[in-house]
Amino acid sequence: MRSTLLATATVLYLALGPLALAPAALAAGGADPAPSQQAKPADPNFARAKAMIEARDYRGALPLLQQVVAKDPKNADAYNLLGFATRSSGDPNGSLQYYQYALSLDPRHIGAHEYIGEAYLMLGRLQEAEHHLARLDSLCVFGCSEYRMLKAAVANYKAGKRPTN
């Protein structure tokens, strides 16, 4: 099927030019989403919270992220950052609920898999961290920084270097 679609697209391109590929791209699922399905404008509180997290003001970012998820309860990125800010504020156990919710919204969220794995290491729960490392390994076919970071954290944990905030 894929080779037939590729051959059709090639013939169309050669015969009619690049605009002829739009229907073939749609059939292959490779087109941009319709304008109504594109990303919503960023919440200013989300942007402010990210800036605060970059400045290591984790506690200050928490209320902003709470406002973001109150307005947009399906925002996996906001829940992931809420978990990160909670964990970085010294509450790794409290962060788990936010990472788990982010993963319930988006089971392929690589950032949430990395961060929940790191939280599990902080709590001495190696097996659960390794579960998320394996999940990242399957999601990051050609590798990704989140996989490498969690893999290093697991190796450090096994070497007796316990993670901190």
Image (cartoon, grey):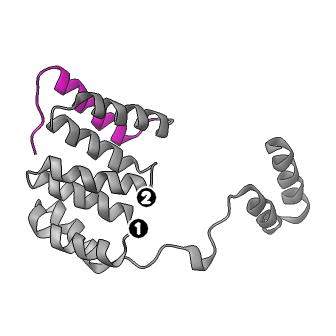
Q: Quadrant of the N terminus?
A: top right
Which residue is at 21% across, 32% downward?
125
* Number of numbered tags placed on the structure image: 2
Q: Residue 65's spot in the image, x, y percent?
A: 23, 70
**Which residue is at the far top?**
159
Residue 57 to residue 64: above or below: above
Q: SS for tag 2?
A: helix
- Would residue 28 appear left or right of 150 to someone viewing this image? right
Q: Nearer the viewer, residue 49 or 65?
A: 65
Q: SS for tag 1?
A: loop
Res. 28 image quadrant: bottom right
Q: Residues within 10 Å of mark 1 (few under 14, many from 20)?
A: some
Q: Residue 62: within the magenta?
A: no
Please provide the residue range marked out in magenta: 143-165
Q: Nearer the viewer, residue 117 or 50?
A: 117
Residue 36 to residue 108: above or below: below
Q: Disc 1 marks which residue?
A: 74
- Would residue 148 appear left or right of 53 to someone viewing this image? right
Among numbered discs 1 and 2, the one appearing first in the sequence? 1
Q: Residue 161's spot in the image, x, y percent?
A: 11, 27
Q: Disc 2 marks which residue?
A: 105
